[in-house]
């Protein structure tokens, strides 16, 4: 969430940044100017009435002291108090309406974020690895997985419906191997602390990271007795997490951290659940877009002056996983029109998929500035300062396990239908070097 005083003092800048994002400031800001002006007028009037009431209170004391009738002045004092209460309530109502407006305003992009309308305006920053060359027509992962008997869409549909999958045998083992490999790299080499959070969170947590109220339809909500009321964020309702970013970031909600603790780097492996409400007809083949998938997440809490450097470091941590696995990728700097709601700057890592002849997102690494920290009330105490301040939060996929899984199938497929296991994963696969169909000879 943006700071109210910042928006008030920089309204034209905010409007320009929203237009850069492809948003209509008139729709998002609504009656912001009028509400703010009305609020300030009511507060000023309250202060004036308070001074008048104080003078009358002194007059009441003087009248009583001299033995005179003070009832008329006392009645006037009571009337002023009632009017003050009404004005304060109206000012509070205006304040709440202003904050409601702020909940729907996205974060403002940093200065080095390119202005653009869609993914077509994103900028390629770097490209790593050579695309594999095949002596045959490479297949997409769904054909490879089904032929090997390690990917089962039919039984998943029987169990749960569309956009689910069952992994079998070495397919299931490869998923587990990837998660362990990623966690080991992040904790042993990159300095992250592993955490295993709940996969059900309350609406306060989803509000804190920016999923609510805007993206309620993209989430799976549990049928709690109270139900969901837009704009009401409870601590005793339950939703399935769309990403580990939500519970991990909210670990420090309503807390003030010591500056010496920063930066804090956490990594978590969890299942993730998304309704994909806005993706009808997209990626219907394969496992690119599922209702349930597994992901290793990286989350950082940093001092404001260090967040840009930590953003680069976090992105490199994700890239290191792809490089160790030998998967070609490119880094894209997202334009203003393609950024997420809470992000101030985002890099997408896109892995090469030869079976589909396309680069596809496998990690999104974002710097949120103090946007999430303000919503979740996460502060730190700067050294030598009396007041606490909002810290900066960052997060990135390190990586999406299912998309890494399918990238391995497509990049390491062999002419005989087998899939070679990347060298870095062989110890995690119990020494298996090649994934074969059941009964297929070596």
Image (cartoon, rainbow, N blue to C red):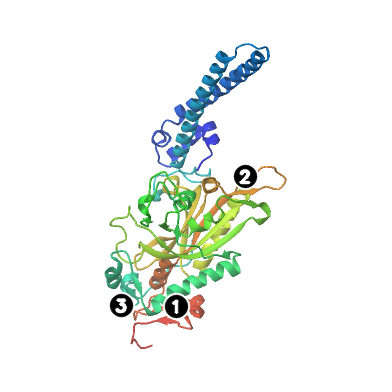
Q: Name the image quarter holding residue 73.
A: top right
Res. 29 visible in picture: yes
Q: Badge 1 is on which residue? A: 421
Q: Looking at the rendered structure, which numbered label has been put on residue 389?
A: 2
Q: What is the secondary structure assignment of the residue under circle 1?
A: loop
Q: Which of 260 and 118 is in front in this view?
A: 260
- The earlier-in-sequence mark between 2 and 1 is 2
Against 164, residue 207 (above or below) is: above
> Residue 342: x, y in percent?
47, 48
- The earlier-in-sequence mark between 3 and 2 is 3
State how far apart marks 3 and 2 are (Cα): 56 Å
> Residue 129: x, y in percent?
48, 66
* Proximity of marks 3 and 1: CB atoms separated by less than 8 Å: no
* Proximity of marks 3 and 2: CB atoms separated by less than 8 Å: no
Q: Which residue lies furthest to the right in this view?
A: 384
- The earlier-in-sequence mark between 3 and 1 is 3
- Total numbered circles: 3
Q: Looking at the rendered structure, which numbered label has been put on residue 147?
A: 3
User: Residue at image x 63%, y 15%?
Assistant: 59
Q: Name the image quarter holding residue 353.
A: bottom left
Against 284, residue 258 (above or below) is: above
């Amino acid at each position: 969430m943006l700071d109210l005083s910042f928006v008030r003092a920089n309204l034209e800048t905010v409007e320009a940044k929203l237009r850069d994002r492809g948003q209509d400031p008139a729709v998002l800001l609504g009656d912001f100017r009028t509400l703010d002006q009305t609020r300030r007028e009511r507060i000023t009037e309250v202060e004036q009435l308070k001074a008048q009431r104080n003078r009358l209170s002194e007059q009441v004391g003087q009248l009583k002291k001299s033995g005179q009738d003070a009832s008329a002045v006392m009645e006037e004092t009571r009337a002023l108090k009632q009017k003050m209460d009404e004005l304060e309530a109206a000012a509070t109502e205006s304040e709440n309406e202003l904050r409601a407006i702020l909940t729907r305003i996205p974060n403002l992009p940093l200065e080095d974020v390119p202005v653009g309308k869609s993914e077509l305006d994103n900028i390629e920053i770097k490209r790593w690895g050579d695309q594999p060359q095949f002596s045959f027509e490479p297949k997409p992962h769904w054909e490879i997985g089904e032929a090997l008997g390690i990917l089962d869409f039919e039984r998943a549909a029987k169990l749960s419906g569309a956009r689910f999958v069952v992994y079998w045998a070495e397919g299931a083992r490869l998923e587990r191997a990837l998660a362990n490999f990623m966690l080991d790299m992040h904790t042993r080499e990159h300095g992250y602390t592993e955490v295993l959070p709940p996969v059900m969170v309350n609406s306060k947590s989803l509000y804190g990271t920016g999923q609510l109220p805007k993206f309620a339809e993209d989430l799976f909500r549990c049928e709690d007795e109270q139900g969901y009321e837009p704009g009401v964020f409870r601590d005793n309702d339950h939703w399935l997490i769309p990403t580990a970013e939500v519970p991990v970031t909210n670990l420090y909600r309503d807390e003030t951290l010591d500056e010496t603790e920063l930066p804090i780097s956490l990594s978590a492996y969890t299942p993730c659940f998304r309704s994909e409400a806005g993706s009808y007809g997209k990626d219907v083949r394969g496992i690119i877009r599922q209702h349930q998938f597994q992901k290793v997440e990286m989350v950082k809490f940093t001092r404001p002056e260090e967040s840009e450097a930590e953003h680069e470091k976090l992105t490199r941590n994700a890239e290191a996983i792809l490089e160790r696995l030998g998967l070609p990728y490119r880094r894209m700097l997202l334009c203003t029109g393609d950024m997420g709601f809470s992000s101030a700057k985002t890099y997408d890592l896109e892995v090469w998929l030869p079976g589909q002849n396309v680069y596809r997102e496998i990690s999104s690494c974002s710097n949120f500035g103090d946007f999430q920290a303000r919503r979740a009330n996460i502060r730190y105490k700067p050294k030598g300062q009396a007041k606490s301040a909002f810290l900066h939060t960052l997060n990135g996929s390190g990586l999406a396990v299912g998309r890494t899984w399918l990238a391995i199938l497509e990049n390491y497929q062999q002419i005989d239908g087998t899939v070679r296991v990347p060298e870095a994963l062989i110890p995690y696969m119990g020494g298996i070097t090649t994934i074969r169909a059941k009964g297929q000879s070596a």
